Image (tube, helix red, strand yellow):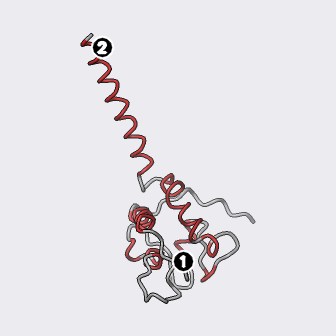
Amino acid sequence: MRGFFAGLGVVSIGLIALSLGTVGAREDASRPEYYTTKVKPILDADCGRCHEGTSHRGGLNMDTRTAMLAGGHHGPAIVPGDPGKSWMVRLIRHEGPADDPMNMPPKADKLSDADIAVVETWIKAGAVMPPDPPKTQ
């Protein structure tokens, strides 16, 4: 009987390790899945109305990595590996005066600290996204 429980313990430890490995892979900010599952929902909810699809306020299109690297009227939105130099992070942190129209989203509360941390983690890990869709002619 003792052998049965010992074997059950080994199986349980194996399943826990496998489960943690899967969670870790989903949490790896250097993988495109991190952008898709963590970052994109934040950007869609808080930035998309003005910077995705056909709306590019301030000249910024956030639909692709290439577009975010090109940036808008003030330069690149993201600097992969350096959240502190990324306009996007500075603006979502509301680092300007409280009534600064550059704070994003404008005329709204800043993103939660947790959402800002997700964006910062993604940028620090290289701002990896799925490949840009091919350009249509």
From the viewer's perspective, tell me whether residue 7 is left or right of residue 18. Answer: left
Label 2: how many Cα within 10 Å (few below 14, some 14–19, many 20+):
few
- As measured in the structure, the alpha-carbon distance from the residue carrying label 2 to the one carrying label 1 is 58 Å
Closer to the chain start, of discs 2 and 1, is 2
Amino acid identity at mark 1: Pro
Residue 92 higher or lower than 97, as above or below: above
Identified at 41% across, 82% down, the residue is 95
Query: Where in the figure is residue 105, as x and y percent of width and height?
Result: 54, 77
| Viewer-nearest residue: 132 or 9 | 9
Query: Where in the figure is residue 12, as x and y percent of width and height?
Result: 34, 27
Identified at 38% across, 30% down, the residue is 15
From the viewer's perspective, tell me whether residue 47 is left or right of residue 12. Answer: right
Q: Which mark is residue 4?
A: 2
Amino acid identity at mark 2: Phe
Q: Which mark is residue 1?
A: none
User: Circle 1 is placed at which residue position?
Assistant: 105
Label 1: how many Cα within 10 Å (few below 14, some 14–19, many 20+):
some
Quarter of the rendering occupied by the C terminus:
bottom right
Q: Residue furthest left?
A: 2
Tag 2's secondary structure? Answer: helix
Quarter of the rendering occupied by the N terminus:
top left
